Image (cartoon, rainbow, N blue to C red):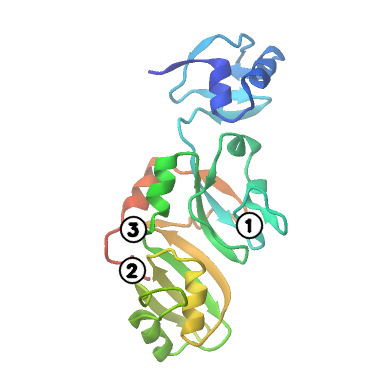
């Protein structure tokens, strides 16, 4: 059981500075169990606490881990200058508590994006040393043939790389589409590998990280917390690539 002053709890959840949270409380904007809490120094049991701030329901979370279905045209940057930022799709409280992307998707790539304020979680799931499989759905400009798939599986040498990069799995899906799994996490890796194999990526979508699939019921531009089941699925992968179904 973890007891905290309510003003500190609100601050930890991204609702502002200690002073701003204190003002929010004294203005009667915070409720717990249907009762207004206006004493900033009141202590509460933080673990699993449900509370309401200005009519919006929240639950205390010691760390923030979430997934976002990233749309086209959004950058994974807090201070984007040329495009919209993925942080526009999140409640300001999440940015307030320092949530950041776990790895990045470029502005022209859609799909599964993880975000967190937990440094250990971010490092674990963005480190190339762990060779975490990431699955992409690729639409190409030119038709995909067996020779191209074989080239991607055998490996292509990219500029500034010392050794060839190989797709952990690759399969043709239609005339101009394939699914591809990579584990290194290099800059623009899928686009560069496809180009090195003699084709060009027209559209790119990340559908899975580790063992976690982008949920079919998570609309484009929407986010949700990672639950225990999601975290278990995320870790449910082995050194061999996830199967392409």
Task: Indicate which label's residue lies in the foreground, 2 or 1.
Answer: 1
In terms of depth relative to the viewer, which is nearer, 94 or 231? Answer: 94
In the picture, the quarter occupied by the C terminus is bottom left
Q: Horizontal and vertical percent for residue 175?
A: 51, 87
The residues bearing labels 2 and 3 have C-alpha atoms spaced at a distance of 21 Å
Give the mark count. 3
Residue 150 against residue 82 in the figure, above or below? below
Q: 16 left or right of 205? A: right
Task: Indicate which label's residue lies in the foreground, 3 or 1.
Answer: 3
Mark 3, residue position: 129
Q: 34 left or right of 82? A: left
N-terminal label among 2 and 1:
1
Mark 1, residue position: 75
- The quarter holding residue 158 reads bottom left
Residue 107 against residue 178 in the figure, above or below? above
**Tag of residue 19:** none
**SS under mark 2:** loop
- The quarter holding residue 213 reads bottom left
Q: Is residue 177 visible?
A: no
In the picture, the quarter occupied by the N terminus is top left
Mark 2, residue position: 243
The residues bearing labels 2 and 1 have C-alpha atoms spaced at a distance of 29 Å
N-terminal label among 3 and 1:
1
The residues bearing labels 3 and 1 have C-alpha atoms spaced at a distance of 25 Å
**SS under mark 3:** helix
- At label 1, counting other C-alpha atoms closer than 10 Å, the crowd grade (few under 14, some 14-19, many 20 or more) is many
Residue 225 against residue 203 in the figure, above or below? above
């Amino acid at each position: 059981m973890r007891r905290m002053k309510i003003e500190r709890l609100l601050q930890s959840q991204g609702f502002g500075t200690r002073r701003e949270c204190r003002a929010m409380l004294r203005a009667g904007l915070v409720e717990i169990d249907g009762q207004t809490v206006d004493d900033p120094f009141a202590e509460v049991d933080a673990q699993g606490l449900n509370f309401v701030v200005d009519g919006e329901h929240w639950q205390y979370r010691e760390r923030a881990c979430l997934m976002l279905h990233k749309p086209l045209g959004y950058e994974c940057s807090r201070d984007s200058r040329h495009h919209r930022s993925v942080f526009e799709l999140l409640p300001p409280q999440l940015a307030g508590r320092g949530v950041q992307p776990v790895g990045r998707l470029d502005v022209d790539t859609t799909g599964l994006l993880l975000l967190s304020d937990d440094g250990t979680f971010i490092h674990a799931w963005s480190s190339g040393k762990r060779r975490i499989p990431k699955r992409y759905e690729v639409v190409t400009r030119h038709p995909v043939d067996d020779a191209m798939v074989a080239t991607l599986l055998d490996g292509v040498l990219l500029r500034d790389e010392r050794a060839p990069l190989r797709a952990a799995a690759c399969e043709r899906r239609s005339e101009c589409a394939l699914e591809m799994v990579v584990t290194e996490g290099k800059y623009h890796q899928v686009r560069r590998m496809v180009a090195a194999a003699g084709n060009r990526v027209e559209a790119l979508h990340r559908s899975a990280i580790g063992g976690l699939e982008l949920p079919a019921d998570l609309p484009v531009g929407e986010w949700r917390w990672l639950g225990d089941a999601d975290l278990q699925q995320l870790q449910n992968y082995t050194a061999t690539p996830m199967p392409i179904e």
